[in-house]
């Protein structure tokens, strides 16, 4: 599996980066438990009969204990985010994925437009130096443990987010200035579900329109803008089962070269 390969080659970088930092016990790991969760929550899952965490605990015995540890670790951590540290970590993830893709695609994958910081962070180049595609990487390690309570979604499926304001601005720029495909890559590293998943800018735009319409409906029904439900709509919550896999991403990128 490609994700397992990525984790193996990434170990030296992440072991060095987190040398003096406590992380969750299976962060930046992949094992049989994660393979079971990947199959259960992503590969064989559907929105017609969405898999619940409660049912998963019956099918995957290890999950009950790990879910408890997950809550104990990540609920406090969600309030301890340090923006500067998050940016540095994000760059580490980008560097590792760019290196990995460069080798797999046999082409140059590097930083995006260094003069225009509004452009997506990474780009894939063809042999002639022209740009084949742009992409951004979003790392998700902390699941929204209370997602079910506040948003009605399962934690594994309702935690991958993008910033609404940033995306609105970037999508406008993409439509006006960028003529190649733009992708958003979700590096998901929850205690249960792990993998690289992706969507394109058109999917993001569609999600924004859907969620904005839902937000407006809730406001009309008297939902306070400052409520927890309203804060949910300050983010774009990607739909896991609509995201494509790492393997599909690699094949799609190859076709662009």
Image (cartoon, rainbow, N blue to C red):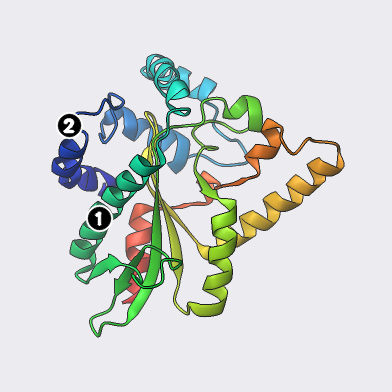
Which quadrant of the structure image shows residue 110? bottom left
Q: Is residue 163 above or below residue 65?
A: below
Mark 2 crowdedness (10 Å alpha carbons): few <14, some 14-19, many ≥20? few
Residue 222: x %, y % from top left: 85, 36
Q: Between 84 and 73, which is closer to the camera in this rendering?
A: 84
Q: Is residue 77 above or below residue 175?
A: above
Mark linked to residue 95: 1
The tally of labels here is 2
Q: For this view, does 126 lie left or right of residue 193? A: left
Q: Residue at x 59, y 55 (%)?
A: 165
Q: Which residue is mark 2?
A: 19
Q: Residue at x 13, y 42 (%)?
A: 12
Mark 1 or mark 2: which comes first in sequence?
A: 2
Residue 137: x %, y % from top left: 38, 54
Residue 38: x %, y % from top left: 39, 37
Mark 1 crowdedness (10 Å alpha carbons): few <14, some 14-19, many ≥20? some
């Amino acid at each position: 599996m490609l994700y397992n390969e990525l984790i193996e080659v990434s170990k030296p970088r992440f072991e060095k980066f987190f040398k003096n930092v406590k992380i969750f016990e299976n962060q930046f790991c992949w094992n049989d438990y994660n393979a079971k969760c990947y199959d259960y929550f992503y590969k064989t899952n559907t929105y017609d009969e969405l898999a619940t965490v409660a049912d998963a605990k019956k099918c995957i015995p290890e999950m009950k204990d790990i879910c408890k540890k997950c809550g104990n670790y990540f609920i406090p951590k969600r309030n301890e985010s340090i923006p500067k540290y998050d940016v540095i970590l994000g760059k580490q993830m980008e560097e590792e994925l760019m290196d990995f893709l460069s080798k797999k695609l046999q082409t140059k994958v590097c930083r995006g437009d260094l003069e225009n910081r509004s452009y997506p962070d990474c780009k894939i180049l063809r042999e002639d130096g022209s740009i084949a595609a742009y992409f951004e990487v979003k790392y998700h390690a902390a699941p929204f443990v209370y997602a079910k309570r506040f948003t009605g979604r399962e934690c594994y499926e309702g935690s991958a987010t993008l910033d609404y304001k940033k995306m609105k601005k970037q999508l406008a720029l993409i439509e006006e200035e960028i003529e190649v495909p733009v992708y958003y890559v979700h590096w998901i590293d929850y205690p249960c579900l792990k993998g690289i998943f992706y969507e394109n800018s058109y999917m993001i735009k569609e999600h924004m329109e859907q969620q904005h319409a839902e937000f407006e409906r809730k406001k009309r029904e008297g939902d306070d803008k400052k409520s927890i439900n309203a804060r949910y709509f300050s983010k774009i919550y990607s739909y896991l089962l609509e995201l494509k896999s790492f393997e599909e991403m690699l094949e799609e990128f190859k076709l662009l070269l």
